[in-house]
Image (cartoon, rainbow, N blue to C red):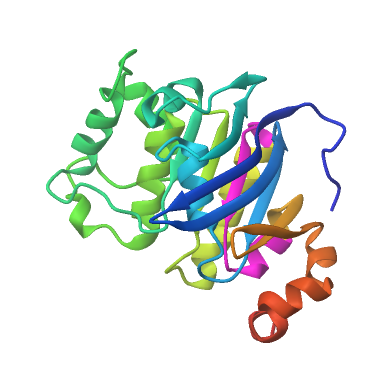
Amino acid sequence: MPTNTSSVALFGCRDIALDLGGRQILHNISLQVSRGEVLGIIGPNGAGKTSLFEVLSGRIRPKRGQVEFEGRDVTTLPLHQRARLGIGRTFQTPVVPDELTVGETFKAARQAYKPYLTRFDAEYGAEVVSFKVAPDVPTVKLDALDRRKLLLACLLMRRPKILLMDEPAAGLINSEVDEIDQHIRLLSKDMNISVIIVEHRIELLETIADRVMVMDAGETISEGSLAHVLSDPKVHAAYFENVVEGALR
């Protein structure tokens, strides 16, 4: 799959280090992603993938290193300020406000911060991800796929430039994973939104990722096409000797 190495990086980080509770979580992590590019991140549990997202999104400040967006150093900016710049994030567990209806959730997202958006913006977000649930339906009744769609629609109404997606296929059946695949293709290739995706479903990354980065013990151990990293002895030693063979059967 072709890469976008000749393009100017939209978003990235350099030499990120993170310590939590006296333990080193991330060690000299660097990455970059161009407009419309999909970068997949894989690795065993505890590799530091979600912690890296915490740093990239602004929830945690690194011990050392720099996060950059559109050529600007945003390392010290908190999450809400990065969101206003166009950096969106989804989480592994699609938590929605169960006490609200779908329409009330969209309204809360529209009025989360200025500039406030209209219901037409919410309709735009819903249309992009084919979310077709009526506004009066309580969110507590939504299945996993519609919860993911609702949260993604709330992000898309703000027209983000990059999405950090933490295991968007978690808990989904194969047909639903195929739908997520199509949505990510639309976002990246048609809408030119960059995507960094942490995912264990190799079959999903096989179809959407332009490049893949493998992490283990807080470090990057391999990077390149999916085929390249899957053939890397370091990756097999760290993780894939048993897991990948089962996932690809």
Along the viewing direction, whichever of 10 and 13 lies nearer the viewer: 13
Tell me if residue 165 can be seen: no
Percent x, y of residue 48: 53, 58
Q: Is residue 98 above or below residue 108?
A: below
Percent x, y of residue 151: 37, 44
**Magenta span of residues:** 190-206
Instruction: Specify the quadrant of the image occupied by residue 225.
Output: bottom right
Q: Does residue 202 show up magenta in the picture?
A: yes
Along the viewing direction, whichever of 22 and 166 lies nearer the viewer: 22
Residue name at image x 51 percent, y 40 percent: 63
Residue name at image x 31 percent, y 62 percent: 143
User: In the picture, which quadrant includes the C terminus?
Assistant: bottom right
Q: Does residue 127 show up magenta in the picture?
A: no
Residue name at image x 30 percent, y 25 percent: 110
Position of residue 109 in the picture relative to residue 62 (left or right):
left
Along the viewing direction, whichever of 221 and 102 lies nearer the viewer: 221
Residue name at image x 47 percent, y 25 percent: 76
Position of residue 204 in the picture relative to residue 154 (left or right):
right
Position of residue 102 in the picture relative to residue 150 (left or right):
left
